[in-house]
Amino acid sequence: MNSEWNSFLQSAKAQFDDTGTVSGFEDTPSPTDNLICDLSHFGTIRVEGEEARDYLQNQFTNDMREVDENIGQLSAYCSAKGRMLAIFTIYQHNDAFYLKLPRPLVEPILKRLQMFILRAKVTLTDLSDELIRIGVSGDACQQQLKSIMGELPENDFAVTHNSVSIQRIPSTSPRYEICGDVEAVKTLWQQLSDAVPTGADGWELLDTEAGLPQIFTETFEAFVPQMVNLQLVEGVSFRKGCYPGQEVVARMQYLGKLKRRMYLAHVDSSAAPSPGDELFDPESESNQGSGKVVRVAPHPEGGHSLLVVTQISSAEADRLQLTDAEGPTLSINDLPYPFEIEEAAS
C-alpha cells in the first residue's frame, strides 16, 4: 500500500488485518447504504503504447474495440484451455488502458502478459501503489459525489475523468470506483461527509450480492467464463475473434449444455468460508466435485453471502453443503440478473 495513503487511513482510524487490508474503522456508525471503502487490496496495471488496444484485443474475452474514454467493461484473461486466470474491470484514459484485479494476482498476470508482447509497441506498468482506488456507494453519496465532480457515469462500467477517474459498478444502489493520485483521492474522501467508512468486507458484500464474479489466487484456472455467468454481465464477446481459450469458450457456448453455473447463496456459519472451498452434494456423481466458492463476504444480519459455482442439478435440488457431509447447508438466493432462457454451453 502507498505509504502516504496508509498514513492517511491510519489518521482516519482505519484498522488493518494481517494482510494489510482495511478491516474496519474505529467509531464507525451503524451499517448504512452510504459507504466509502479503501480498495487497496486490488491492484492496477496500466497498458499503453500505439499497439496496446490490438494487443489486449488478442488476449481478453471482451471486445476492446468498444472501450473508449467513457465506456469501460468487464473482461477476463484465459489459459489456452479456456480457464480464467483473472477477471478485470477496464477503462481507458489518455490513450492508456487501466486494468483492476486482486492485488495478489498483479505480479503473475503482469509476467504472463509480458510474455506475449513480443515485438508489439506496448508497455505494461504496475501502478498499484501509485494510483489510489476507493469505492463509494449509496444514494446520498451519489448526490454528494455529483455535486463535487459535476458529472458521473450513468451506465455500468462507464467512466468519467476529472481530477480522478470514476467508474460505475453494478449494484442495487448507485456505486462507483474512484481512482487517482493520493492527494486527489484524499481530498475527495474528506469531502464525502455523507459516506460511512467501511472495511473491505463491506465492498465485497456489494460485489457478491451484485453477482459479479472474481478470480482469486485460490481459484486460478478453476472456471471457464460461462461457469461464473461472465457472459450474463457482458464480460464476453462471441463476435470479437481469437484470444487464448477462445475455441473452448465458443464451443461451450454453441455446442454444449451448461451443467454448472454461478449462484448467489447464504450460509449460517460463524466461520468464514474462503474462495476455492469445495461444495458437497450427497447425491452428486460428478468426478469433478459438486462445486466451489467463488467469493464470500460476512452478512450484517449474520452468516455469510457467497457466490458459488455448482452443478445446476445440485442447486435446483437444494442439497448443497460446504466442504463435506458435516458442513453447513447453503440456501440459494436470486441473483440480480436472470439466467439465459435456453443455455447452450457445457
Image: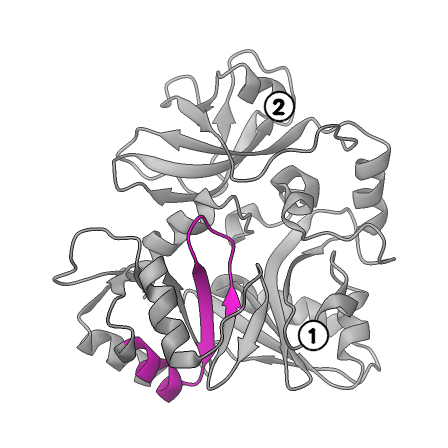
Distance from disc 1 to disc 2, alpha carbons, whole Å, reads 37 Å
Location of residue 175 by image quarter? bottom left
Residue underneath mark 1: 68
The disc label shown at residue 312, or none: 2
Residue under the image location 61 percent in, 25 percent down: 311
Q: Secondary structure at mark 1?
A: loop
Q: Residue reaching furthest top? A: 283
Residue 172 makes an appearance in the image: yes
The image's mark for residue 201 is none
* Horizontal relation, residue 313 to residue 190: left or right: right
Q: Nearer the viewer, residue 191 or 286?
A: 191
Which sits earlier in the primary sequence, circle 1 or circle 2?
Answer: 1
Where is residue 116 shown, x and y percent of the image? 78, 71
Colour mapping: one colour
Could you tell me the amino acid type at mark 1?
A: Asp
Figure label count: 2
Name the foreground residue: 107 vs 194.
194
| 16 on left or right of 282 | left
Give the percent coordinates (x, y) of residue 156.
Answer: 57, 59
Q: Which residues are magenta?
A: 167-189
Residue type pointed to by label 2: Ile
For the N terminus, give its image quadrant: bottom left
Considering every residue shown, the one lying at the far left of the view is: 27
Verify whether residue 96 appears in magenta. Answer: no
Q: Residues within 10 Å of mark 1 (few under 14, many from 20)?
A: some
Q: Residue at x 39, y 21 (%)?
A: 329
Q: Is residue 183 magenta?
A: yes
Residue 224 in view here: no
